[in-house]
Amino acid sequence: MRPASGAQTARSRGGVVLAEASWPEGGDGVPAVVPGFVHSGFAPLVVAVADRCLRRRYGEGPLPAGNRTAVVLVSASGDRASAAHVRATVAAGGRIGPLFFFQSVPNSVAGHVAARWGLDGPVVCLNPTGDARAEGAAEADLLLYDGDAAQALLVLIEQAPDGTPGEATAVLLGEGTRQ
């Protein structure tokens, strides 16, 4: 995934880009560990980019109650590292611990971000079949347009297949003026 460019900050059907961030940005190393998530860099990457984006708009959280901010997490590959670990453990006849229920990591970390920031809108996870950014933005626009949310935090994440942390972009969409 590529970080958002200036050309992509135009008004969408549902709102404007209020803030955006990517990981890595200059000087970034490995994102901080997130308690409750093991083995994989997927959750730390989501939390790091979401925090960065929301801080750019609001400073420190949580947001006030009634903010109706949705989280839309989009990933074509999901949590690669955990999936590979589970696959190898099963192939070797081993037992998988409950924290490796890898299918739940995207949902769990999206919920973690929502709870951490007090986001009280819907939480949606997508596995795109085409352009991840376009599909995620369309879902966010739908939530805004239908009134299900006043803002939507769109998080696009892909882990690198070689085990390196990967890249993520977060975009906060809603009504208002870009900061």
Image (tube, rainbow, N blue to C red):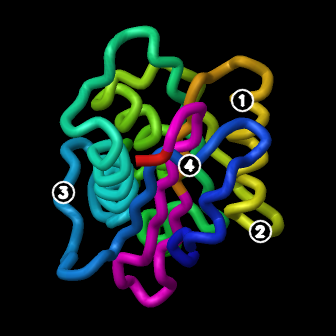
Q: Tell me the kind of residue under disc 3.
A: Val
Q: Mark 4 vs mark 1: give the one in front.
A: 4
Work out how far the residue at label 4 is from the one at label 2, CA to CA, in angstroms: 18 Å
> Of marks 4 and 3, which one's residue comes earlier in the chain?
4
Q: Can you give x and y, in whole percent of width and height, for residue 80 in the image?
A: 50, 70
Instruction: State if disc 3 and disc 1 touch (CB < 8 Å).
Output: no
Tell me residue 162's x, y (percent). Answer: 44, 89
Tell me the kind of residue under disc 1. Answer: Leu
* Label 2 neighbour load within 10 Å: few <14, some 14-19, many 20+: few
Which quadrant holds the N terminus?
bottom right
| Disc marking residue 33 | 3
User: Which residue, given by chain and number where applicable, does mark 1 sit on?
Assistant: 143
User: Mark 4 or 3, which is nearer the eye?
Assistant: 4
Badge 2 amino acid: Asp
Is residue 112 among what the camera can see? yes
Q: Which residue is mark 2?
A: 131
Seen from the viewer's position, the closer of residues 103 and 74 is 74
Mark closest to the chain's N terminus, 2 or 1 = 2
Rendered position, 124 above or below 120: below
Determine whether, in the image, residue 76 is placed left or right of residue 82: right
The magenta segment: 156-177
SS label for mark 1: helix
Give yes or no for residue 160 being in the magenta stretch.
yes
What secondary structure is found at the residue carrying circle 4? Answer: strand
Q: Tag 4: Cα neighbours inside 10 Å, few (<14), some, or many (≥20)?
A: many
- Mark 4: amino acid: Val
* Label 3: few (<14), some (14–19) or many (≥20) C-alpha neighbours in 10 Å: some
Say which of marks 4 and 2 sits in front.
Answer: 4
Q: Residue at x 42, y 24 (%)?
A: 119
